Amino acid sequence: MSDNTMVYEIAPAPAKTLLCPSAQPDMKDARLLGVVAGMAERPELGYLNEHVPVTDQLLASAAPVRPGQVFRIAARCDEHCCAHFDGTRCRLATRVVQILPAVTEGLPACLIRPTCRWYQQEGRAACLRCPQVITETYEPSADYKRAATGQ
């Protein structure tokens, strides 16, 4: 009697390229995540519903203010080249979840969630805080500064 058992080898899934949801415009594969809306004392990100690449023309459209005051950019996570990365995790994402309050009850309509470093690491808790994260703020609170810098 022969053994008709079939053995299949499963190749490991390719590693996903994770995106940083708080990137700088010169980072690899930079795309616009959203536009800052709301009041100056309580800004909130309006998420885009289509992929828009970051271009010099787009950045110039923010004038007379700096692009980081108007836009939030996502780009390929720089991992070891980033001051927030500890070798395995994004400390910025951890601090955002630990320090900042949730600002929404539901998940924002975000195009990058499947490949977002913050979501992959911190899950839903990061998404509930994400709309309040603005790259360059006028007068950040003490908690916001602590989340951003770790100090």
Image: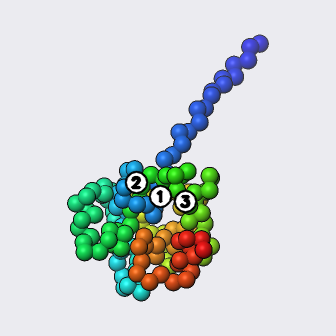
Residue drawn at 42 percent across, 70 percent down? 135
- Most extreme residue toward the top is 1
Direction from residue 89 to residue 32 in the image, left or right: left
Residue drawn at 69 percent across, 19 percent down? 4
Mark 1 highlights which residue?
A: 20
- The secondary structure type at the circle numbered 2 is loop
Give the image quarter of residue 139: bottom left
Which quarter of the image is occupied by the N terminus?
top right
Q: Which mark is residue 135?
A: none
In terms of sequence position, does the residue under pointer 1 or pointer 2 come before the other?
1
Within 10 Å of disc 2 (Cα), the crowding (few <14, some 14-19, many 20+) is some
In terms of sequence position, does the residue under pointer 2 or pointer 3 come before the other?
2
Give the image quarter of residue 30: bottom left
Q: Position of residue 97 (x, y in %)?
A: 59, 71
Q: Amino acid at mark 3?
A: Ala
Q: Position of residue 18 (x, y in %)?
A: 49, 51
Res. 124 in view = no
Q: Which mark is residue 83?
A: 3
Direction from residue 51 to residue 86 in the image, left or right: right
State the CA–CA distance, disc 2 to disc 3: 14 Å
Q: Compared with residue 134, is residue 21 higher up or lower down, i.e. above or below?
A: above
Mark 2 highlights which residue?
A: 27
Query: Which of the pair 108/87 is nearer the observer?
Result: 87
Which quarter of the image is occupied by the C terminus?
bottom right
Q: Position of residue 43 (x, y in %)?
A: 40, 80
Q: Are marks 1 and 2 in contact (CB under 8 Å)?
A: yes
Which label lies toward us, 2 or 3?
3
Q: Are marks 2 and 3 in contact (CB under 8 Å)?
A: no
